[in-house]
Amino acid sequence: MVDFLADNNLCGQAILRIVSRGNAIIAELLRLSDFIPAVFRLKDKSDQQKYGDIICDFSYFKGPEYYEGKLEAKPELQDLDEEFRENNIEILSRFYLAFESVHKYIVDLNRYLDDLHEGVYIQQTLETVLLNEDGKQLLCEALYLYGVMLLVIDQKIEGEVRERMLVSYYRYSAARSSGDSNLDDICKLLRSTGYSSQPGAKRPANYPESYFQRVPISATFTSMVIGRLRSDDIYNQVSAYPLPEHRSTALANQAAMLYVCLFFSPSILHTQQAKMREIVDKYFPDNWVISIYMGITVNLVEAWEPYKAAKTALNYTLDSANIKEQATRYAASMESLRPQVQQLLKEGFLREEIILDNIPKLLNCLRDCNVAIRWLMLHSAESAYDPNNKRLRQIKDQVLNDSKYKPKILFQLLLDTAQFEFTLKEMFKQMLSEKQIKWESYKKEGSERMTELAEVFSGVKPLTRVEKNENLQAWFREISKQIESLNYEDSTAAGRKTVQLIQALVEVQEFHQLESNLQVCQFLADTRKFLHQMIRTINIKEEVLITMQIVGDLSYAWQIIDSFTSIMQESIRVNPSMVTKLRATFLKLASALDLPLLRINQANSADLLSVSQFYSGELVSYVRKVLQIIPESMFTSLAKIIKLQIHDIMEVPTRLDKDKLKDYAQLTARYEVAKLTHDISIFTEGILMMKTTLVGIIKVDPKQLLEDGIRKELVKRVAYALHKGLIFNPKAKIQDWQSVHQSTHIPIPKFPSVDESATFIGRLCREILRITDPKVTCYIDQMNTWYDLKSHQEVTNNRLFSEIQNTLGTFGLNGLDRLLCFMIVRELQNFLTILQKTILKDKAVVEVFRTLQGAVSPVQGIVANASKVYSSAVAKSQKIWGTYLEAIMKVGQMQILRQQIANELNYSCKFDSKHLAAALENLNKSLLADIEAHYQDPSLPYPKEDNTLLYDITAYLEAAGIHNPLNKIYITTKRLPYFPIINFLFIIAQLPKLQYNKNQGMTCRKATDPVDWPPLVLGLLTLLKQFHSRYTQQFLALIGQFIRSIMEQCTSQKIPDMPSDVVGALMFLEDYVKYTKLSRKVGFRTIL
């Protein structure tokens, strides 16, 4: 018969693929549960007020028109909704695909069962598949995994959050218009159940059975699966646990599957007492806390509380006498096992011959240790007992008292057991790999000994007092041939024959009175020893390793191991060499990966890598978390050393009086420094003692761990110091998982906000913006200095950025520059929104623009009665310029700061890294030349779209200050009506507020109506840069026309002095040419 899992068995491959996908889906759900955007929980009042109208649960589907109408009525809500969509659509799509895959999983499983029923798979029915060992396992796993998926979703992603995410995805995606979308079915399956994982939360009625029945599954199938799980040992685990008292541990995985599958047939839990009694007697006679999947623990006392039959059956297990019996048994077991394992771990005790002679005893010891650890870890776990449930508290207290539970002792036993298991496995693997070589070597030695003895009795080879004996000669030659003929491949026959040969050698020694000759006796004894070694060697079998793997399973502790983290860290702090033992524990925990990966591997699924990486990454993160105590302890010692050196130890002067030598010696303080320094070196040695280890599929290098740990602690301490130090007293969001600067291993820590800034760099930036605010300061470009408008005192200058670089370094200053860059983007976006949705929607103002456009056409001409036309337009549009001016000035202010930062970065780069600066400048010029040449001749090369060269070089150029912030395109824009006219009107509306000064240029007329000239010019220049160049040309043409028209009017009216507005317009053109580095001819052409 064809193997059920063979590639050509369609029936087996179909169910294998379904089960493989099930394990991958659970891994994805667990992965995503760490990335739920906090805003969907709507826990904070601020979030509720801000997002309450755009985040809806399933009540949205009752009246989508009402909700959408509310949004359309308020432009600010539309903007917020659009921003929210951009920030979250990627993660929402990922969640939706995971939810969709859960629904697809159960649909595919139902279709497979229908195909079995309809005979699609030749000669295969549900009954025949369940008769096959692999088929039975896979069908049971298929139902069990679906149940686990639903439980994981409800436990990790709360019902309300799910609903809000699904509604948001529906609103923001194209799924609503797609005809083949099964969004309705997914919503029905995953709508809120009312369950909450918060301690003390009330359990909903008929939960989880009503949840499990949302997609109907064949009752026959669930009944047959539960029947198999009840009666069979489907994974043949009992063979690895021969002792009857270990049976519940042997069947623990099957018990977890049965627990989940029973919710698909709740009538058994409610009314079928005989079945429940049978289940409890077989699976739960001595345990009531179980792990259902990768360490997710469940307490049956709580889980089966609403079910009469299940509760009654479990009462026998929960009898206080039974609890006491189990707790005292495992307490006694732990007491006896600890010294036993410690004895086995003594240096040099576990030798090859000891292992070969005592395989059953060593395996029994391993079993006892693992069973005791499992029971005590699960039944003493805090997470398994709801503190608000009185009965659970009583049971937990009884377990802890009767077992004399001490977490440190249990942890020590776990450490020793893991080390013993690891050592035994490694030695056994070594023996297994050398098995045949050693066996052949012993065979050769034995055969040669017999040949030598045959030669001795031939009388040819001299040996003291040995007479010639042809019979013995022939007999020993025959024995030599028999040994030589032993076949390694046929181990059973070889073993039997070896025993007979040993017996024959014993008998020949007795019957032929060979005892009198010591040398002959020695030869015979050596040969018997070699034959014994052959029997031992032939008994080295892979089954022992498989048994060790089954017995050593620690998947149940995947989550509860975290409760021992503080004990692990304290042990490392006291004794850093403890890391070597922890390595074995981590490797033991890594064996938990076999459970979800087995089927994925068998199915040759592409999910193998991603699932392996997820679980391996989780475990490596935990290893890092535990070992982080070493860098923490190092920095604590360093802080003490710094304190001693700064505050306690006096600096020794170059000349010192003899009588003061003792005072300056300060032996106690210096001894303390030496001791702390020694402690630091011991800590680093401790982590480096942990060899490079493969945890799952991730290689953990201890040197890298130490470096990352030190960097993490350094980041934490520096960030905290800056967070505390940079707090001032003045009068588009990126998720962590999207940020290239955020790391899971060396995270940038988050501190409670003290203002609107998320970090200290934001506070620093806002403080610089506050002190250089154009409303209260005046920037003098030639001096690179800001002065107070009222007192005329210097506020700050370009040396500020030099100080920042000295303090925060190049990366800090570059980070400040990037933040300003994003602030400019936000300011420009907000500005355009105001322009489009407020200014261009005001009919009266638009009419002013239309009238003026008609009056100034064509721009090459002169405007008749210019003063009246311009002043009338300015007066009618006066109300819009306040907001306009504020936005332009903010952008200009930030551009000045960016210029100063670029100058400082470029200056320091040329001094500190002249070769880098020269290389970057030359590369930049070469690239620009090539790009220009390509546009002249398209056949010449140009970087392709997938080539990241231009993007990568930009980051280097900005870090080295080799860029001009004024040339940067910050936002993408669309065509806007009247845009040149609006900006022209804006600039001539500001000119009356300014006056020309020969020494200072354009300055503010009144401190009460402040306008700072450089930010105004740079802000307007930046705004125009975001649009097509023809807008700029039209804008400059309008200014030129303004100058000509006003001057024409002055000439005709014989006014001798040039009006101040014309001076201002000319100064604007002058500065525009200067900042854009254009030829002065452009300015002349504009005027003429």
Image (tube, rainbow, N blue to C red):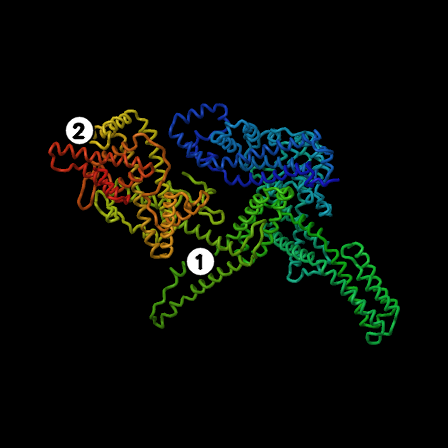
Classify residue 207 as left or right of residue 727: right
The reply to whether the C-beta atoms of the residues labelled 2 and 1 are less than 8 Å apart is no
**Could you tell me residue 1059's position as x and y percent?**
16, 36
Q: Which residue was labeled with disc 2?
A: 865
Measure the C-alpha gap from mark 2 to mark 1: 79 Å
Q: Which residue is mark 1?
A: 638
Quadrant hosting residue 67: top left
Of the two numbered discs 2 and 1 on the same chain, state the one appearing first in sequence: 1
Name the residue nearer the viewer: 12 or 1043.
Answer: 1043
Give the side of residue 230 with respect to residue 919, left or right.
right
Please identify the quadrant where the N terminus is shown. top right
Residue at 16% across, 33% down: 1048
Q: Position of residue 288 (x, y in %)?
A: 65, 40
Q: Secondary structure at mark 1?
A: helix
Amino acid of disc 2: Asn
- Residue density around tag 2, few if under 14, some if 14–19, many if 20 or more, within 10 Å: few
Q: Is residue 837 visible?
A: yes
Mark seen at residue 165: none
Q: Nearer the viewer, residue 504 or 289?
A: 504
Q: Is residue 345 left or right of residue 674?
A: right
Q: Quadrant of the C terminus?
A: top left
